[in-house]
Image (spheres, rainbow, N blue to C red):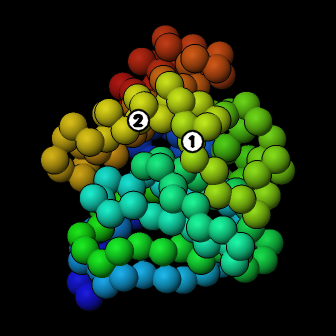
Amino acid sequence: MNMETKRYKPVHPILRKLINFFWVNTGELPALNHKLLPIKNPDLIINISPQPVSLDDGKTETRLRSIYFTGIMDKFRFVWKRAAGPIELIGVSFLPAGFFPFFEIPLSEFKNSVIDLDLLNPLLAERILEQVTKPKAIGLKIQALEQELLNQLHLNRIIDPKLVQLTQKF
């Protein structure tokens, strides 16, 4: 089992106020089954791997799409299931108050849940997946993800594009 996890701090000053870090998991994994641990922040997860991820809550097994997020978890939930093979996951670990500006839905709506992003915002899911799968280098994938998140803040009228251009110069 050869697995590597790297963390990247957001580059853009506005994103530093909303996102704790980006993370990337790459490598080869055997079949994987594990529980979700309690966490105090939501994560957006992009599965670029050829193998899908499924969740099993003990009653039903749900196959997740390529982009999904975890809400705040206050207890052990779900079992993740993956087939053996190569893995490439990119994640965004939001600060506790960092989720709302991007999605404009209170995080409490998703407590103890895992939700496919395209059920919440199909256009954003499509844009992120398109931009993140284009470049080969991880650094370029993270840059593309940062740009899509900044674009979403602009679409949600959270930030002015002129402010984004100005702060990118620093």
Name the quarter where the C terminus is drawn. top left
Q: Quadrant of residue 72?
A: bottom right
- Report if residue 83 is visible in the image: yes
Q: Amino acid at mark 2?
A: Ile
Place of residue 80 in the rendered image (x, y in percent of width and height, measured from the top left): 53, 74
Give the image location of residue 146, x and y in percent. Answer: 42, 38
Residue at the image position 71 percent from the left and 73 percent from the top: 59
Q: Is residue 26 left or right of residue 33?
A: left
Which residue is found at the position 59% from the left and 67% from the top?
61
Residue situated furthest bottom in the rendering: 1
Nearer the camera: disc 2 or disc 1: 1
What residue would you read off at disc 2? 128
**Position of residue 92 measured from the top left corner of the image (x, y, whole percent):** 50, 52
Where's residue 133, x and y in %?
26, 42
**SS under mark 2:** helix
* In the foreground, 4 or 9: 4
Q: Secondary structure at mark 1?
A: helix
Quarter location, residue 106:
top right
Dot 2 or dot 1, earlier in sequence: 1
Q: Could you tell me if the residues under marks 2 and 1 are in contact, i.e. CB atoms within 8 Å?
A: yes
Q: Badge 2: few (under 14), some or many (20 or more) residues near its Cα, within 10 Å?
A: many
Q: Which mark is residue 117?
A: 1
Q: Indicate the amino acid at tag 1.
A: Leu
Residue drawn at x 78%, y 77% is 75
Question: Rounded to the nearest whole Å, what is the CA distance between mark 2 and mark 1?
Answer: 10 Å
Q: On screen, 84 above or below 151?
A: below
Residue 143 visible, this angle: no
For mark 1, does the 10 Å Cα neighbourhood hold few (<14), some (14 to 19), or many (20 or more) residues?
A: many
6 relative position to 27: left or right? right
Say whether residue 156 is left or right of residue 5.
right
